[in-house]
Amino acid sequence: MTMDQQTGLMSLNMSPFDLSPGPDGSGSGSGPSGASQQYVPQGAAYQCTSDQQPFGYANLDASYLFPTGTGSEPGTYLPTAGNVCDQTDTKDVIEELCPVCGDKVSGYHYGLLTCESCKGFFKRTVQNKKVYTCVAERACHIDKTQRKRCPFCRFQKCLDVGMKLEGEFVVKIIILLKFNVSHLLRKPSRHKFMYVGQVSGSYE
DNA sequence: ATAGCCTTGAGG
DNA sequence: CCTCAAGGCTAT
């Protein structure tokens, strides 16, 4: 493997790959193309338990998870189809917000409702095999105004909330992760292998 | 590099 | 034919 691949994989592997299926076990790997408006992304990390700060990623903005405000102020997050907290029917009333940065969503992209910029960012990152580094502690706050500041944490958050590509490319990434990256880490992440299991299973 | 807009193609 | 998501294009 080339050095370029290695660094890329290291970058990917630093993200918490907890894309395990939701409680309904619907993690079949079916893509958004086959999804209706009921499509629920598999972003387990963003589901609701009151004490959830999974895996110690402080950049998971708690205000996105557990809104306490009225929802009237800009940037306030309320549950949407992309965030399966005990949903009331706020969807019809409140403009949907990107689970990554809180910007206005433009549709389903890579598995869930996101804004146009995060869609493009995710696309560029994956297609160009971008390798980012975080100058802080991989826990940067990501919102609409600060999303440009740390692409590492932004991409990490994209993965956290459940953005994913479909098809062969993902399988290749998973295989590479499984066979080439785990040994590079002193402490392999169990979450990574949860992800591997889910995705590889869907292609059996 | 980012983000908004446009084009394309697949599926219903 | 319509809708929607992926990818392309381009101004910033």
Image (cartoon, coloured by chain):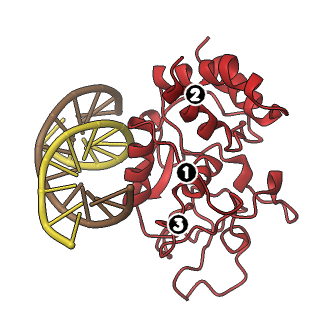
Chain colours: A red, B brown, C yellow
Above or below, A9 relative to A110: above
Q: CA distance from mark 1 to mark 2?
A: 18 Å
Find residue A19 and report its horizontal and vertical position in percent.
Answer: 68, 39
| Residue labelled with disc 2 | A6
Label 3–label 1 contact, CB within 8 A: no
Residue for point 42% across, 52% down: A121
Give SS at disc 3: loop
- Residue at the image point whose x is 45% and y is 33% from the top: A34
Rendered-image quadrant of the N terminus of chain A: top right
Check disc 1 and report the residue beneath it. Answer: A155
| CB within 8 Å, label 2 to label 3 | no
Nearer to us in this view, A194 or A82: A194
Residue drawn at (65%, 25%) of the image? A177
Which amino acid, by three-letter code, is at mark 2?
Answer: Gln
The quarter of the picture where the C terminus of chain A appears is top right
Q: Are marks 1 and 2 on the same chain?
A: yes
How far across and down, in percent of the image, does residue A65 sit?
Answer: 71, 67
Please, which chain is the residue tagged with disc 3 on? A
Residue position marked by numbered label 3 in the rendering: A101
* Left or right side of A80 for B11: left
